[in-house]
Amino acid sequence: MCKNYYKSKYRNLIVGVDTKVPVNNGKIVTAINFDNAATTPPFISVLKEIFDYAPWYSSIHRGSGYKSLVSSKLYEESRKIILDFVGADDKLNTVIYVKNATEAINKLANRLFDKKTRYVVLSSYMEHHSNDLPWRKDYKVDYIEVDECGRIDLNSLERQLKKYRGKVKLVALTGASNVTGYINPILAAAKIVHKYGASILIDGAQLVPHTNVNMKNENIDFLVFSAHKMYAPFGIGVLIGPTKTFERGAPDYVGGGTVNLVTHNYVEWNSPPNKEEAGTPNIMGVVALVAAIKTLNLLRRSEIQQYENSLTIYTIDSLKKIRDVKLYCIDSDVLRVGIVPFNIEGVEHGIVSEILSNEAGISVRDGCFCAQPYIRKLLKLDSNNIDRTRNRPGMVRISFGLYNDYSEVDRLVWILSKIVNNKEYYRNKYYKNYLER
């Protein structure tokens, strides 16, 4: 059923939704962004807060001027807002500001490292590289299996924990996959992890912007997420975890802001979280993140999730009707965020994404989405036979934000049907460009 008449009620909250872009036939069309899993456009409210705060911009924790005091107060009060947003206990946990979720995970990997014991970290087959590679340097890393549909296998998690007999320090698990959109059973996983004396880290980059997360209720020990995926693209991310974790030892980055006392022979580190935030803080990023949180709270994330889920189902049902479109991991009985991966038989994923952009003004992502082992598993490819050429296996990914609507999906369906019906024409037109990318 066509839902052209149904526009997202959230569109007027977003900057740039009506931006015009050129396409190959010489026309100008309204751009469509279906690459929100990578990054989102800003809320109008975020830009307004940035603009309103700008006259008060000053150094944090380093001045006695009025603007500096205002900025420092805003910066410190923001931590409580973020802890409340994700249901964290502010008496036990702290918020550490970083650039993004990737930096947050690297920071945690550095801070949990113990030279005396080479602990085990369990990642999973569905992780983004950022929740796998940081652990490989100083830990033994092993992996939790996924089933044939790409969903986490909790039995595998428990088998791995039993196997290592108390040596697992941390289980690093995505909250929602950036490839399939599957939302992992966090509470069930956390219960198993804690049963064996380990801690659990949730990569919330794809989860936090789209649904309610409650660290206390779900027994989450560590949580990371990025503001640029939640309508506040100003270079800020957060690492949330127990304050005591960061009390001992030196921070991974040292310098201004990390110390209480320094001589040429002695260093006394600051208390967390300040000890972990070297250099001048990104106060503009914090202002943007807080503004985004306030907007999301007003909108209610449960309603956002319901709308995005409806849009996802509509997309899946529409794509099922197009011959030669191969959909991956579309189980209707599994909780998910608004992500739909697919391929067109006989047309390379990179060519499909280029056609969508050049012919219809639609932005999607293609490739492996920084999750190559997971993609290879979903495509049932031999992990030992890796193609190092440009013609690597992958998928096309549609990922929704709250501002996307049904009419945009209809335009996507129209151009995909056109590609399927004119494969040879489009392959001849775009194959050379694809090889040169």
Image (tube, rainbow, N blue to C red):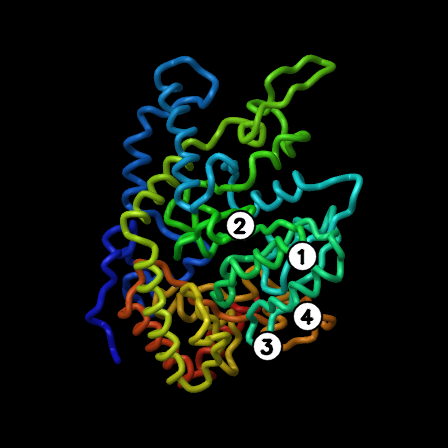
Residue at label 3? Answer: 148
From the viewer's perspective, is 394 left or right of 235?
right
Measured Cα–Cα span from mark 1 to mark 3: 20 Å
Measured Cα–Cα span from mark 2 to mark 3: 27 Å
Q: In the image, what residue occupies the spot 33% across and 64% down? A: 306
Q: Mark 4 against mark 2, which lies toward the viewer?
A: 2
Label 4: element kind = loop
Q: In the image, what residue occupies the spot 42% across and 31% down? A: 283
Q: Which mark sits nearer the N-terminus, 4 or 3?
A: 3
Q: Which mark sits nearer the N-terminus, 1 or 2?
A: 1
Which label belongs to residue 220?
2
Which label belongs to residue 387?
4
Residue at label 1? Answer: 122
10 Å crowding of disc 2: few (<14), some (14-19), many (20+): many
Kindly indicate the quadrant of the structure image that contains residue 267. Answer: top right
Q: Which mark sits nearer the N-terminus, 1 or 3?
A: 1
| Residue type pointed to by label 2 | Ile
Q: Mark 4 against mark 3, which lies toward the viewer?
A: 3
- Mark 1–mark 2 CB contact (< 8 Å): no
Q: Mark 2 against mark 3, which lies toward the viewer?
A: 2
| Residue type pointed to by label 3 | Glu
Q: Position of residue 231 (x, y in %)?
A: 37, 49
Q: Position of residue 346 (x, y in %)?
A: 52, 82
- Mark 2–mark 3 CB contact (< 8 Å): no
* Outermost residue, left side: 5
Quadrant assignment for the C terminus: bottom right
Measured Cα–Cα span from mark 4 to mark 3: 22 Å
